Image: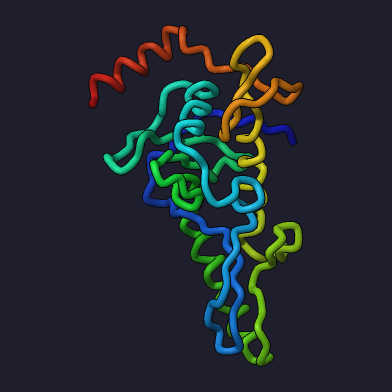
Amino acid sequence: MSFRMRLASLPADVAALEVLQFMAHCHDRRGRVTRSFDPVRGPVLGAEVEYGALFAYLFRRFGYPNAGWDFNRLARYSLATPRDDLFLIVEPTIAGLTSQVFSFMGPASVHSAAEAYRRARVTAQSEGGNAFWVRDQELRRWDARDPLTPYAQAAARALDDLLKPVWLDEEGAIDIFGGVPRTSRSVRPANLGSPQVRGAASRHSGAS
């Protein structure tokens, strides 16, 4: 199924959503976490992203921010993912830690089910007496029975789409890390001259 990222509004019942964490944890024989790895954000984004390049990309590709933000953030974008019930939230910050800039919101019921799955695995595997990973460090090896797996896969696809360069001029483009050559994967920029976008910008300015 093809997917192309776009702006997306959170549902009215936002309380039914919760931040989903796609972390792989290594546990010791007592079940305590000794190491952690993010198999969704880590391979695609790394640990940090520069806020200026990221915001320039978001503005060039999607236009004006479509969600409100507080004083700790420079802007807030709510973006679609391959799943209708999963949203990518991007909030550029000066620090630029990807774990804080990029988050995913999904059904609270999935979060609860995933936690129950994790606790059951920790209880079962702690009895073996050896260190273990509840979720593998490679996303492709995650258990299909894990309620979090299809959401993690959709999140990874969304981040991969976010790496598509957006046209800048006749030959160049930018991605979330800065300037790059234009390729066949590059996408056209947002049409900021449309009446609808100008109206949205005016409403945003009036609300600040």
- Compared with 138, 200 (above or below) is above
194 left or right of 189? left
Q: How far from the left and from the top, in percent, is residue 51?
A: 45, 36
User: What coloring was used for the rendering?
Assistant: rainbow
Residue at 36%, 35% in the rendered image: 74
Is residue 130 shown to the viewer in this render? yes
99 left or right of 159? left
Q: How far from the left and from the top, in percent, is residue 147?
A: 62, 62
Is residue 117 shown to the viewer in this render? no
Q: How far from the left and from the top, in percent, is residue 94?
A: 39, 42
- Compared with 128, 182 (above or below) is above
Q: Count how many numbered circles sit on residues in the image.
A: 0
Residue at 29%, 19% in the rendered image: 203
Judging depth in this view, the residue of 185 and 126 nearest the camera is 185
Q: What is the quadrant of residue 162 in the picture?
A: top right
Q: How far from the left and from the top, in percent, is residue 200?
A: 36, 18
State the quadrant of the N terminus: top right
- Compared with 132, 152 (above or below) is above
- Compared with 101, 203 (above or below) is above
Q: What is the quadrant of residue 27 in the picture?
A: bottom right
State the quadrant of the C terminus: top left
Residue at 44%, 50% in the rendered image: 100
Residue at 64%, 73% in the rendered image: 134
